[in-house]
């Protein structure tokens, strides 16, 4: 597969580099994921960055910091490795690692907004993002409007003089809607607002929002980046160094940083993101093919289907269509029955791990959206397709649907 990372540009590396005017070939995604920010340890030659499980650092005289480290909330070498790698794989100027995806979102919100500002969010945003806006940001004085982001006229109409950011998810959770990042960057920038993209579902391997005009990328690294359902984390990657610096200030001032072990696990996951994602996508395509033929399934939601309203945009901005698949069963009873009958697909929340998961968004991940503009259909089932043997996954689902 071709890399989405521009191959012949002169974007300087975040961790130094020669700069200058000669075009530098950007390394491919998997090379960056395995090597960026991860030079072998200068003392021992260890090829994997150590877990610097430490809070403070000896100073060589007052103010005499070694490598800039003084206290691990401000910076920690294991976290730095992850942050440099995240910036490189998203082709941004600055990466920052947080204790969770929501901690990253909160830091972003409070860096770019002041009370009195306004933000446009997707009308099918991740439930926790909606809750952050409705229960934390709004009482603080930031207003927001949920808007269908696939409808550019609706987004333009929702823009106000005080709109500070357009917040995008694509694909969305759990309805797998697609938003056109380039077009939305145009709308946001015309309004003097920032374009924020939550890239959790696609991961930087499938989609690179900064190259499409976004200003900041948000991740729940808990999902595909970590990839093994063993760590909770979040990240921000800023396109330009000034915004990166302001975000770094808030990361330190607010303090919701990723700990060294969590940073290490996330970095370990990131190394294999490319190969895992290829398999997630291939398995998802097999399952979509089976579901679209199945009599018991009413509708399959997957951006890889030509009938999906966002298919052309997804094909333009994504390398492949991802490992998340949703489908409708016609009734809540039928949806719940499938969720409770699979054996290999584990009934559980979250997504993006190597193991396949199944859930009923209406009563699980999106239960808190009931009665809000983000309420999801009761007959919906969501799959996070793992990287197990595809035939085993198909058999498991077919038995549950029978
Ligand atoms: C899970 C998720 C989040 C929140 O991340 P946490 O790591 O759970 O705090 C944000 N956005 C999306 C799209 C998610 O799936």
Image (spheres, rainbow, N blue to C red):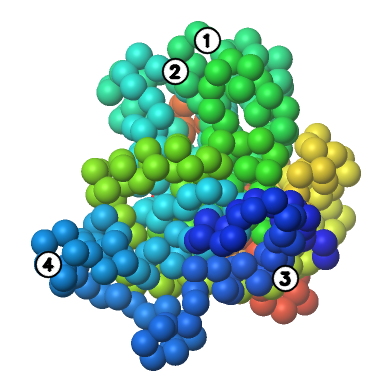
Q: Residue furthest bottom?
A: 44
Task: Out of 298 and 356, give the one closest to the viewer.
Answer: 356
Residue 400: image location, x then y, percent: 67, 65
Q: What element carries label 2?
A: strand
In space, the residues marked 2 and 3 are separated at their CA atoms by 40 Å
Residue 249 position (above or below residue 184): below
Mark 3, secondary structure of its residue: helix
On residue 279, the disc is 3
Q: Residue at x 63, y 10 (%)?
A: 157
Helix, strand or loop under label 4:
loop
Query: Could you tell which of marks 2 and 3 lies nearer the N-terminus?
Result: 2
Q: What's the CA distance linking mark 2 and mark 4?
A: 47 Å
C-alpha span from label 1 to label 2: 8 Å
For the residues carrying marks 3 and 1, which lies nearer the camera in this image? 1
Q: With 199 as the anchor, is 66 left or right in this view?
A: left
Say which element carries label 1: loop
Disc nearer the start of the sequence (4/1): 4
Q: Distance between the residues labelled 4 and 3?
A: 52 Å
Callouts 1 and 2 close, C-beta under 8 Å: yes
Q: List the residue tagged with mark 4.
A: 61
């Amino acid at each position: 597969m071709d890399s989405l990372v521009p191959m012949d540009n002169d974007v300087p590396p975040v961790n130094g580099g020669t700069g200058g005017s000669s075009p530098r070939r950007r390394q491919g995604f998997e090379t960056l994921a395995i090597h960026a920010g991860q030079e072998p340890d200068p003392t021992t030659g260890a090829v994997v960055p150590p877990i610097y499980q430490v809070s403070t650092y000896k100073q060589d005289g007052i103010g005499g910091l070694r490598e800039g480290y003084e206290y691990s909330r401000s910076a920690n070498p294991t976290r730095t490795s992850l942050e440099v790698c995240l910036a490189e794989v998203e082709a941004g100027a600055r990466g920052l690692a947080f204790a969770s995806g929501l901690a990253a979102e909160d830091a972003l919100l409070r860096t770019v907004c002041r009370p009195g500002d306004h933000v446009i969010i997707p009308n099918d945003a991740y439930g926790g993002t909606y809750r952050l806006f409705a229960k934390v940001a709004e009482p603080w004085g930031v207003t927001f409007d949920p808007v269908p982001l696939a409808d550019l006229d609706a987004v333009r109409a929702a823009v106000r003089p005080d709109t500070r950011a357009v917040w995008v998810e694509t694909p969305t959770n759990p309805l797998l809607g697609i938003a056109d990042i380039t077009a939305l960057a145009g709308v946001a920038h015309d309004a003097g607002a920032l374009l924020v993209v939550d890239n959790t579902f696609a991961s930087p391997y499938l989609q690179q929002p900064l190259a499409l005009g976004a200003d900041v990328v948000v991740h729940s690294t808990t999902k595909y980046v970590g990839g093994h359902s063993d760590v909770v984390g979040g990240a921000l990657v800023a396109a330009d160094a000034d915004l990166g610096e302001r975000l770094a200030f808030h990361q330190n001032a607010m303090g919701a940083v990723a700990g060294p072990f969590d940073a290490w696990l996330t970095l370990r996951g990131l190394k294999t993101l490319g190969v895992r994602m290829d398999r997630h996508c291939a398995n998802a395509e097999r399952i979509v093919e089976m579901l679209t033929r199945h009599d018991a399934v009413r509708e399959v939601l997957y951006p890889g289907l030509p009938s999906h309203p966002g298919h052309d945009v997804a094909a333009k901005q994504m390398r492949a269509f991802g490992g998340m698949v949703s489908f409708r069963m016609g009734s809540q009873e039928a949806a719940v029955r499938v969720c409770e009958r699979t054996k290999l697909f584990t009934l559980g929340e979250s997504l993006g791990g190597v193991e396949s998961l199944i859930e009923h968004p209406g009563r699980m991940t999106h239960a808190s959206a009931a009665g809000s503009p983000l309420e999801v259909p009761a007959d919906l089932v969501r799959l996070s397709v793992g990287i197990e043997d595809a035939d085993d996954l198909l058999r498991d689902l077919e038995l549950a649907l029978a």
